[in-house]
Image (tube, rainbow, N blue to C red):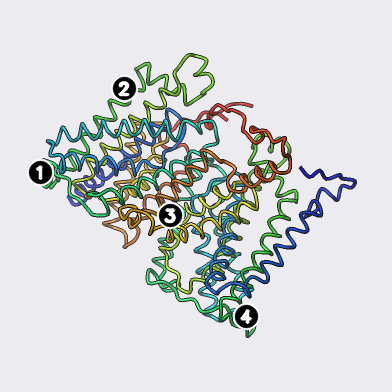
């Protein structure tokens, strides 16, 4: 029974990692770059939601919608300003630029009056409610996280698999020059995918806020989402969630059964093992080109 | 441009390409040697920090700038070097020997990191090194019998063969000698076939393999040497700081090292020094400028990270060759005056090539 309890809490924590990893995978699937500022985008989304609820007094769902919209716009602007000029340079440059953007976001948030370095509470209607399912005690926040994640993954998977825009985005990431030849508006699609990814990050932040409160260092959880994305495979959307859940469950178990201190490194040990055994991840694609 | 007329193959390998370089580097050496007698102890201690960070930057530059491998975990090697030095110095080992053992240990750890790293590229390598950094940090925090855990390790003053370093001046000279030797070593490495193999691996792995370079061995050598150099810097770092704790060697520190290397100029020895100087000078400038800014900005705790991030993004967008690149462009402008053209150093427009299908 305790094992089930640990598994459930591991799954819900893993879904948060999975949501952030989803943002990574979205951008990677479309532009083959990794956004190291995804954790900070999540933090910004949570802060925007906080402003909408506490300072502007909007009802919860309206605040969520507002946060998603604002962050989507922000993601689009970010892509235009910072990523577009350096597309074509080696991956290292984009990594460093997104790291820089993360630093800027963290620094600027401390300067905004009302946000600053305090820890805020985001008022959500399901905060604090507890459900009893079978013999298990499950917090309502965990259930909402799991449900929202599954819904989002299904939608995005269908988007990439069946819609023209989704297929065009995959084409862009595989061979940008050929995509240009086929008449695909590459720059517009890049902007769109960054907007979607920022909105997903904002959703992750809003879902995490009732659990971990809203503060400027919230984005460091993004560091744990990297192992999730690697374990699942960087090019696969369901993989991101599966990877996140794997990491979440492993972490939950090592927190309960292993000595102190293993909980923090469990995720990274898993990712190192994964990189040695199967570098492309559980659902990753191995493509090879003959020279 | 200074045109060097070569009459001998040996001239290709010379350290100083022409007499102008010999003169200026000689002047620099003399200036560095007499600086402690001219400046206050505070500036001398800051210069020591710059020298130590330069060694770190040289180590990272060897791996990232010259071999093209991304590493987000170099703080782990710095930690290994620092803790080894701390433990051995407490046992009474003279400094050169403990520094050598520190470098060796860091090199071994570099081999452990490098071996799985041979199979992965790009972003996966960055994540693997980041994961490794976090694991090493946690191990150092838990291994309390050796490292003192989270409370930290006290390191005594630098001591060798009866001579103890008591003041800033002596520490500066020790750091200067070590930096000079490491720089000479790295420059010689880059002139040698091994060093040229590194650069070949950076530019195109398939071409390098076709020329007969053993890719795996090359990358592993680069990892080990880079880790060893960072371990040497760690030994000096331990003596400079006197107390070392695991949370001085986090992923943020690794990212700061990468920033140092990128802002200085990726792929050049000078870039390491420029980057180190920049990283030390910026907080001083911020401390001075704080009073002139409105309180909401000036007193915020996030001012330094924000400025760092802004400068990093600015450099990558507008000056990808870094501070050294800016210096080279300025120098070329004056050398070629008035024939300098604006696009002389511009990169070719490139389309994004998929790394999965390379």
> Residue beneath label 1, please?
A131
From the viewer's perspective, is residue B140 above or below residue B293? below
Q: Are marks 1 and 2 on the same chain?
A: yes
Q: CA distance from mark 3 to mark 2?
A: 37 Å
Residue B148 location (% of width, % of height): 41, 73
In this rendering, which labeled residue sits more in front, label 1 or label 2?
2
From the viewer's perspective, is residue B204 above or below residue A289? below
Identify the element where label 3 is drawn.
helix
In this rendering, which labeled residue sits more in front, label 4 or label 2?
4
Q: CA distance from mark 1 to mark 4?
A: 67 Å
Judge left or right: residue B265 versus residue B196.
left
Image marks 1 and 3: residues in contact by CB distance under 8 Å: no
**Which chain letter matches label 4?**
B
Residue B140 location (% of width, % of height): 43, 65
Q: CA distance from mark 1 to mark 2?
A: 31 Å
> Residue beneath label 2, please?
A158
**Which chain letter matches label 3?**
B
Q: Are marks 1 and 3 on the same chain?
A: no
* Residue furthest top in the image: A182
Estimate how packed mark 2 is, as few (under 14), some (14 to 19) or many (20 or more) residues with alpha carbons within 10 Å: few
> Residue beneath label 4, please?
B160
Identify the element where label 2 is drawn.
helix
> Residue beneath label 3, please?
B252
Estimate how packed mark 1 is, as few (under 14), some (14 to 19) or many (20 or more) residues with alpha carbons within 10 Å: few
- Mark closest to the chain's N terminus, 4 or 3: 4
Q: CA distance from mark 4 to mark 3?
A: 33 Å
- Mark closest to the chain's N terminus, 1 or 2: 1
Using the image as rendered, state which of residue B144 and residue B77 is in the foreground. B77
From the viewer's perspective, is residue A20 above or below residue A221? above
Judge left or right: residue B24 versus residue B86.
right
Judge left or right: residue A25 versus residue A9.
right
């Amino acid at each position: 029974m305790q094992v089930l309890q640990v598994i459930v809490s591991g799954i819900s924590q893993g879904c948060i990692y999975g949501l952030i990893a989803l943002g990574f995978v979205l951008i990677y699937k479309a532009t083959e770059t990794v956004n190291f500022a995804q954790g900070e985008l999540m933090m910004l989304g949570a802060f925007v939601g906080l402003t909408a609820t506490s300072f502007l007094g909007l009802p919860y769902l309206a605040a969520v919608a507002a946060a998603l919209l604002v962050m989507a716009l922000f993601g689009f602007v970010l892509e235009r300003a910072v990523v577009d000029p350096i597309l074509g340079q080696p991956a290292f440059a984009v990594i460093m630029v997104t790291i820089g953007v993360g630093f800027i976001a963290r620094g600027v948030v401390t300067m905004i009056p009302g946000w600053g370095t305090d820890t805020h509470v985001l008022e959500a209607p399901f905060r604090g409610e507890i459900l009893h399912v079978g013999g298990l005690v499950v917090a309502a926040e965990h259930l909402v996280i799991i449900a929202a994640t599954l819904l989002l993954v299904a939608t995005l998977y269908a988007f990439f698999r069946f819609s023209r825009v989704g297929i065009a985005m995959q084409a862009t990431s595989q061979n940008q020059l050929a995509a240009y030849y086929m008449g695909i508006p590459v720059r517009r699609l890049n902007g769109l995918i960054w907007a979607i990814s920022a909105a997903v990050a904002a959703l992750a932040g809003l879902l995490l806020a009732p659990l971990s409160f809203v503060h400027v260092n919230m984005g460091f959880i993004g560091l744990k989402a990297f192992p999730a994305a690697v374990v699942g495979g960087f090019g696969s959307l369901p993989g991101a969630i599966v990877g996140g859940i794997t990491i979440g469950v492993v972490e939950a178990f090592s927190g309960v059964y292993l000595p102190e201190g293993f909980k923090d490194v469990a995720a990274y040990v898993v990712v190192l093992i994964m990189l040695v055994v199967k570098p492309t991840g559980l659902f990753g694609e191995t493509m090879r080109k003959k020279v | 441009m200074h045109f060097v007329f070569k009459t001998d193959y040996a001239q290709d390998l010379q350290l100083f390409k022409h007499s102008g370089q010999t003169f200026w580097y000689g002047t620099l050496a003399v200036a560095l040697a007499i600086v402690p007698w001219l400046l206050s102890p505070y500036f001398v201690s800051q210069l020591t920090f710059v020298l130590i960070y330069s060694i770190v930057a040289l180590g990272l530059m060897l791996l990232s700038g010259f071999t093209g491998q991304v590493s987000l975990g170099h703080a782990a090697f710095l930690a290994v070097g620092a803790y080894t030095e701390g433990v051995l110095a407490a046992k009474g080992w003279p400094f050169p020997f403990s520094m050598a053992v520190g470098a060796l240990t860091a090199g071994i750890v570099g081999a452990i990191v490098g071996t799985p790293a041979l199979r992965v590229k790009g972003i996966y390598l960055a994540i693997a090194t980041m994961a490794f950094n976090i694991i090493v940090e946690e191990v150092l925090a838990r291994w309390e019998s050796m490292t003192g855990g989270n409370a930290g390790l006290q390191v005594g003053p630098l001591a060798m063969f009866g001579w103890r370093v008591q003041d800033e001046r002596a520490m500066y000279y020790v750091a200067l000698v070590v930096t000079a030797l490491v720089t000479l070593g790295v420059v010689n490495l880059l002139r040698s076939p091994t060093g040229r193999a590194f650069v070949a691996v950076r530019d195109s792995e398939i071409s390098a393999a076709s020329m007969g370079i053993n890719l795996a061995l090359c990358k592993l050598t680069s990892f080990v040497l880079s880790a060893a150099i960072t371990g040497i810097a760690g030994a000096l770092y331990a003596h400079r700081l006197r107390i070392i704790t695991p949370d001085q060697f986090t992923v943020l520190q690794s990212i700061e090292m990468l920033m140092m290397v990128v802002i200085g100029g990726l792929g050049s020895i000078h870039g390491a020094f420029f980057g180190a100087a920049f990283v030390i000078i910026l907080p001083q400038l911020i401390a001075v400028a704080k009073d002139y800014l409105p309180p909401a900005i000036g007193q915020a705790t996030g001012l330094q990270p924000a400025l760092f991030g802004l400068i990093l993004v600015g450099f990558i967008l507008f000056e990808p060759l870094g501070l050294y690149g800016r210096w080279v462009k300025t120098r070329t402008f004056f050398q070629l005056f008035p024939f300098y053209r604006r696009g002389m150093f511009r990169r070719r427009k490139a389309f994004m090539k998929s790394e999965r299908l390379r």
